[in-house]
């Protein structure tokens, strides 16, 4: 029995969360380092811009901190819970964009370097994708995002969304078709010509 | 391939670009999230309980680390901890020793539990 330097390194998420709920501040650091990047990445892909993504990610983590005292091991996975919460927070915000164009969303630079045309195009594309997601019904937007932005399997998505696999398949198919139709008119603007994507 | 829907091609390309985004949290953002966590913990524990600065970690090490306790519910872990380090409200000399910094040595690597040592402490 040795005193390990890093006793938390092998601990599963829910064990860390319970330690957090019992007041261990180390657990908070481990959980943040481990979970925040994934949450932020998911939010960034759905929201299409960094500042809204940070708002969503911070909100999702706050909900995790608050639910920690009630967390029961072996009932759900922390990652499943976070996918669900982040997904819902994103569609809540995207719903507010519906009907409104993102004209007043000034493209923030992706980093401190002077804006580069390629960066601006990527940014415009991600904003356009996010705006199109915003036009979908929430459940379609979530299913499509979890499938095509997060790369999750249909059974995983079914668990996150608490629906059947068949429902996931139906939502993703309809959502993807709707997205393709919404994006169709913006091909030239986003740097795609009619024959092939760039 | 002229059979594919060009709209789908564009969408698939957009999806691929989005998937390749790997947003790393800035140090400032990490700090903000941690500050939120600290705030929530402070609100959860109105009294100062001796479970800060790694005492939990040391207790877990004494039990054999996370692999040993991962099957236990939080209540069980808490119960073990309370049994080892009773809250300060317990009127007990041993308890007051364990609830103190003396416990750092108690869980040292090479500790061999010797009841005589406590009496001399």
Image (cartoon, rainbow, N blue to C red):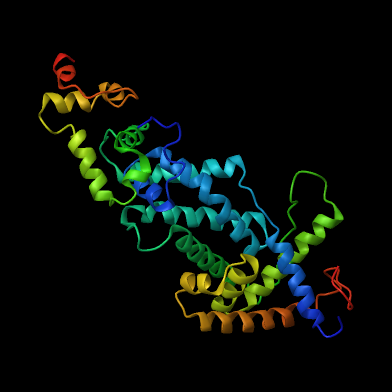
Q: Is A54 above or below relative to B47?
A: below
Q: Position of residue A154 (x, y in %)?
A: 55, 74
Q: Which residue is pictured at 52% across the width and 83% down the height?
A: A167
Single out the residue that lies furthest toward the top. Answer: B120
Q: In screen coordinates, is B85 left or right of B65? A: left
Q: Position of residue B54 (x, y in %)?
A: 37, 33
Q: Which residue is pictured at 29% across the width and 42% down the height?
A: B45
Q: Based on the displayed image, in which of its 4 quarters is residue A173 positioned?
A: bottom right
- A108 and A122: which one is in front? A122
Q: In screen coordinates, is B97 left or right of A28? A: left
Q: Based on the displayed image, in which of its 4 quarters is residue B9 positioned?
A: bottom right
- A52 and A145: which one is in front? A145
Q: In screen coordinates, is A96 left or right of B52? A: right
Q: Is A193 above or below relative to B75?
A: below
Q: Based on the displayed image, in which of its 4 quarters is residue B97 positioned?
A: top left
Q: Is A67 above or below relative to A148?
A: above
Q: Position of residue A163 (x, y in %)?
A: 46, 78
Q: In screen coordinates, is A129 left or right of A3? A: right
Q: Position of residue A83 (x, y in %)?
A: 51, 63
Count of marks placed on residues? 0
Q: Quadrant of the N terminus of chain A?
A: top left
Q: Which residue is pictured at 61% across the width and 56% down the height?
A: A41
């Amino acid at each position: 029995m040795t005193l390990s330097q890093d006793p938390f390194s092998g601990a599963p998420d829910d064990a860390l969360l319970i330690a957090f709920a019992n007041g261990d501040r180390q657990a908070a650091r481990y959980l943040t380092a481990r979970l925040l990047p994934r949450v932020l990445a998911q939010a960034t892909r759905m929201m299409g811009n960094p500042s809204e993504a940070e708002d969503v990610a911070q909100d999702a983590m706050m909900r995790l901190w608050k639910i920690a005292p009630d967390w029961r091991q072996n009932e759900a996975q922390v990652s499943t819970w976070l996918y669900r919460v982040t997904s819902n927070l994103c569609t809540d915000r995207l719903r507010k964009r519906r009907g409104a164009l993102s004209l007043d969303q000034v493209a923030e630079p992706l980093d401190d370097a002077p804006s580069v045309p390629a960066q601006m195009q990527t940014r415009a594309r991600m904003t356009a994708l996010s705006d199109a997601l915003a036009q979908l019904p929430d459940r379609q937007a979530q299913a499509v995002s979890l499938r095509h932005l997060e790369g999750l399997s249909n059974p995983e998505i079914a668990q996150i969304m608490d629906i059947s696999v068949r429902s996931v398949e139906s939502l993703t198919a309809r959502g993807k078709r709707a997205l393709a139709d919404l994006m169709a008119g913006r091909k030239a603007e986003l740097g795609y010509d009619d024959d092939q994507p760039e | 391939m002229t059979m594919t829907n060009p709209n789908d091609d564009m969408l698939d390309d957009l999806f691929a670009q989005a998937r390749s985004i790997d947003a790393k949290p800035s140090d400032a953002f990490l700090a903000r999230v941690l500050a939120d966590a600290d705030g929530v913990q402070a609100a959860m524990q109105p009294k100062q309980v001796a479970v800060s600065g790694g005492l939990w970690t040391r207790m877990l090490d004494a039990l054999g680390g996370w692999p040993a306790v991962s099957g236990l519910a939080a209540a069980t872990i808490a119960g073990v901890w309370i049994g080892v380090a009773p809250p300060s409200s317990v009127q007990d000399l041993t308890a007051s020793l364990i609830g103190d910094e003396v416990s750092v040595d108690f869980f040292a690597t090479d500790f061999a539990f010797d009841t005589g040592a406590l009496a001399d402490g």
